[in-house]
Amino acid sequence: MKCVRLTIKGIVQGVGFRPFVYNLAQRLGLRGWVLNDEHGVKVEIEGEEGVIERFLRALKNEAPPLARIEELWVEDRPLQGYPSFEIRRSERTKDRLVLISPDIATCDDCLRELFDPRDRRYRYPFINCTNCGPRFTIIRDVPYDRENTTMASFRMCPECLREYHDPTNRRFHAQPNACPTCGPQVELLRSDGTRLEIRDPILEAIELLKQGKILAIKGLGGFHLACDPFREEVVSALRSRKYREDKPFALMCKDLDTVAELCFLPDGAKELLLSRERPIVILERKPQVKVAPSVAPGHRTLGVMLPYTPLHHLLFSDGLKCLVMTSGNVSDEPIAYRDQEALERLRGIADYFLTHNRPIHMRCDDSVMKVFRGGPLFFRRSRGYVPVPIRLKGTRRSVLACGAELKNTFCLTKGEYAFISHHIGDLENFETFRSFEEGIEHFKRLFEVEPEVVVHDLHPDYLSTRYALEQDLPRIAIQHHFAHALSCMAEYGLEGPVLAVVMDGTGFGEDGAVWGCEFLEVDLRGYRRLGHLRYIEMPGGERAIREPWRMAAVYLERATEGQGIPDRFRERGWEVLKEAVKRGLNSPPCSSMGRLFDAVSSLLGIRDLVNYEGQAAIELEQIADPRAQGSYPFGISDYIVDPDPVIRAIEGELRKGVSRAVAAMRFHRTVAQMILQIAERARDERGLSEVVLSGGCFQNLLLLELSTELLEERGFQVFVHRKVPPNDGGISLGQAYYASRVEV
C-alpha cells in the first residue's frame, strides 16, 4: 500500500479534470481526494503501488479533451487510511497561477443534444459542457468558479444544479451550465433597439438574412456583422456602411462540404477548420465560385471558418449554407462587445440585432491563419488560443511587454509562462487604447502578475511606448526588428547566434531611419546589424505607405535616372515631390521590404493607392503566376542589397509586354534569392547556419515557401513562426523573451 500527493499544473480547471480524476479513482478502487487550488489541481491517492502506477498512466493518456498537463509532481505521503475518494472544495493561497482555458467550439455531444427533439436543451443556443463553450471571454477572476464569471446572475434550476454537482455527469462544475429554464436567452432587436415580440428570434433572423438584411449577431467575444455573401448589393451595402473599402470579409460556412465547394483544401486545412479552436483559415478559392466580388476584392483567396457556438449552428439549421461573418465594428475600431455599445456603434450598419443577455467580460476577435506546409501560420492569434501560454526557457523575472503599434498584442510573463494577449488591434484611437489598458489589468488580475520590468518598442510616438513610459517600473526599449527575430526564437527556445531575416513595412531604426529589410546576427544578449536593403527616401513620409505610387516613382527616379517615370506619376505631382526629396523635406530614408513590394505593385499597375495596410503587397502576391520561371538581377555589397537592377529589369520587361503575373512571380523569386545569397555569405563569414524568418512580409505564403525551399536546399536550418504571427502581433513575445532574461 502506498499514498502519494500529485500537484498538476496546466489547463486543468474548468475542463472536467476533477470529475475525470474522481471517476478514474473510482474505477481503479483508489481512495483519497482531488481539489482545485490556485496553481492547478492537487490529488492525494492511496492504494496498491501497481494500481497507482496505472492511475498515473491513465492521468496522462485519458485526460479530458480540453485539459493540458504542463507539469506533474509526485510526492510520497504517509498512509492516511482514507475511507473513499471525494472531490474537495477549492483552496486559495497567496501565490496563485492557474491556466485558463480558451473559448472552445461546441463539442459533438452538445451538438447531438442541440438537435435532438427529445432533449431538454433542444435548440437551446447556450448549450455547453465541461468539454466546450465560453471560458476566457466570461471569466472575471480565479478560481474559475461560477461566481467569478458573467454567469453569476443566472441561478441554476434543480436539474442543472443536479448535473453540476454530479461527478459522473459531463456538466460537473461546467460553470456556464444552463438550460432554457434558467439560462440566458436570445432576442431580436430592430436597429433602434426595440424588441421584436416573436416566438423564435433565431428562425426570424434566418428569414431576415435570406431577405438580404444585415444583422449584428452577438458571439463569444463580441458582435459579428452577418449577411448573404452571394448577393453583391448586400455585401456592397455592408462595405459602404462599415467604411471598409477593400479589406476582405470572413465567411462562416455551415460545414466542411460547403467550404470544399468554395475553396481548395491543402494538407492540414481540414484539421485547422475542424479544430476546437475554429479559426478563420485563408484558402485559395475555386474558379467560378459565385461569392459576391465585394467579399474579397482583388483576392483569389477566401477567409473561411466553421460554426463554433450553438447559436451559429442554429443559424444554419434552416437553409443557409454560408454567411459573411465579419467583426462588428466600424473600420479601425475594436470589435463591439457590450450590448449598449453595440447598439450605439452598429445601428448605422446593422438592420437588426440578434443578441442575448449573457455578458461578455473580455472582447476577443476571431483568430486568423493560413496553412503552411500542413501547419498553422498565424495572422492573428486570438479566440480559441488565448490565454494558452507559451513557455519561455530561462526566465528570471515577470515582465510586461507592450508590443507594437499595429496589430498590437501585449505579453505578461510569470515563471516560465508567457501570456500573450488576444488581438488588440491598431493603437490609433482612444477605444483601442482603452481596450489595451483594460486587457493588461485583466491579465494581471487573472494570473496575479506584478511585473518587475516593462519593455517597449524604440519608437517614441507609439501609444504602447507612451503607456510603458508612464509605468513606475524599470524600462527596457527594444528595437522593432530585434523583437521580431526574438519572437520566432522564443517559439523554439533558440538562444543563438542565428541569422535573422526580418522583412516588414516599418520599424524605428537605431540610426533614426525607417528599417524594414534587416539581416541581423542575433542572440539573447543583443544583435548585430549585418546588412539591409539599400536606403531610399519615403516621399511624404507616412503618405508613401498609403500611396505606393510614391515609392514606385522614387525607385524609378533613382534606378533609371528619371527615364522610366510614367505619365500617371507626373500627373499626381511627382515633379514637385521629387524636389522635396532632393531637399530632404519629409522624406525619411527607409530600408523597407514592404515599401519595395509597394513600389513593384504600383510599377506593375496593380495598386497606386491602398485602403488598408499591406494591400499593394497582398495583391501583388495574388496575381503572381507560380508557373513563371526566372528572376531579376540585384546587387550585394557588404551585406547591403541594391534593388535598383530589379526595378530597371521590371521596367524593361513591361515595355516589352511581359505580363504582370509573370513579373510578379519573378520578383518574388528575386527576393528569395536575395535572402539566400545573404544567408550563404553569413554562413561563410559568421558561421551562421540557422536562419529565422520573421516580419509581416513572411505572411506572404509564396515568398515564405520560395525562401524556405531555397535555404533548405542549401543546408540551412530554417525556423518559421507557428505559435504567434510573423507580423507585429508577435512582437510582444519577442520583447518578453529578451526582458525576462536580460539583466536590467
Image (cartoon, rainbow, N blue to C red):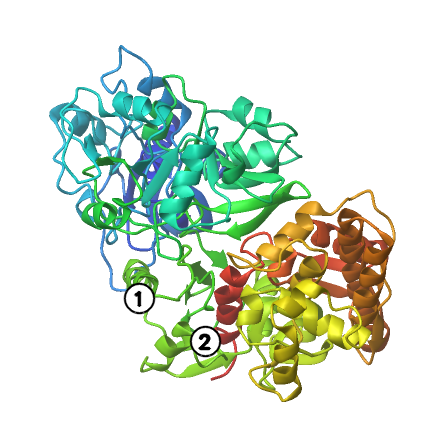
- Tag nearer the camera, 2 or 1: 1
Give how far across and how far down residue 640 sits, in percent. 77, 77
Q: Residue at x 22, y 49 (%)?
A: 344
Q: Is residue 481 left or right of residue 654?
A: left
Q: Which residue is mark 1?
A: 430
Amino acid on which the number 2 mark rests in the picture? His
Give how far across and how far down residue 378 sits, in percent. 55, 50
Q: Which residue is mark 2?
A: 456
User: Vertically, is 609 above or below 225?
Assistant: below
Could you say which is closer to the camera, residue 73 or residue 46?
73
Q: Quadrant of residue 152?
A: top left
Give how far across and how far down residue 6 sits, in percent. 38, 48
Q: Is residue 560 left or right of residue 173?
A: right
Amino acid on which the number 1 mark rests in the picture? Phe
Could you say which is closer to the camera, residue 493 or residue 601?
601
Q: Quadrant of residue 570?
A: bottom right
Q: Residues within 10 Å of mark 2 (few under 14, many from 20)?
A: many
Q: Residues within 10 Å of mark 1 (few under 14, many from 20)?
A: few
Could you say which is closer to the camera, residue 203 or residue 243?
243
Q: Residue at x 45, y 81 (%)?
A: 460
